Amino acid sequence: MPAGDFTLEEARAALLTIRDTVVALQQTQRTLRAVKDELNALNRRHLNNGVVGERRIREVNREQRRLGEQAQRQISVITSAGAEIKGLDEGLIDFPTTIHGVLAYWCWRAGEDTIDWWHPRTSGFSSRRSVDEAR
């Protein structure tokens, strides 16, 4: 990993090492949301004197902890590569750089083949520009 700024080639190489982890993290996050929703529903029923198996609540709590730990490991893989997670639902990943003296990010979104975009650090995804403009 570069000490600070990534060249485009370095960012693309780093992306290759974390791409599958980003997709896996997105799935973990979706599953974690579903587990949290189930736990909230179970707890609401329990508070309303509903018959809820304490065993199921314990199982869902364990699953929530397991998924949270899994997500933390996945996040660590991504950030250890020097990438920044900007939008997990969309799979937005940025790599810090400087382009023509401007602090910027190489920008990638899950589903894209490679990094073809960049934007200044003061703006976001909606301000993406083609990497051709950075050369």
Image (cartoon, helix red, strand yellow):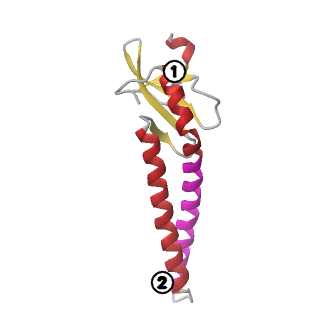
Tell me where the magenta segment starts and ends, as one range. Answer: 24-48
Check disc 1: other Cα within 10 Å, few if <14, some if 14-19, many if 20+.
few
* Magenta span: chief secondary structure: helix
Q: Residue at x 65, y 36 (%)?
A: 111
Q: Which residue is mark 1?
A: 9
Locate the N terminus by quadrant: top left
Q: Which residue is mark 2?
A: 47
Q: Is residue 13 above or below residue 88?
A: above
Instruction: Please say whether residue 10 is one of the residues in the magenta stretch.
Output: no
x and y percentages locating residue 123 in the rendered image: 44, 27
- Quadrant housing residue 120: top left
Nearer to us of marks 2 and 1 is 1
Is residue 31 at least partly visible in the picture? yes
Say which of 92 and 50 sits in front.
92
x and y percentages locating residue 81 in the rendered image: 44, 36
Is residue 44 at least partly visible in the picture? no
Mark 1 falls on what kind of element?
helix
Q: Is residue 59 above or below residue 114?
A: below
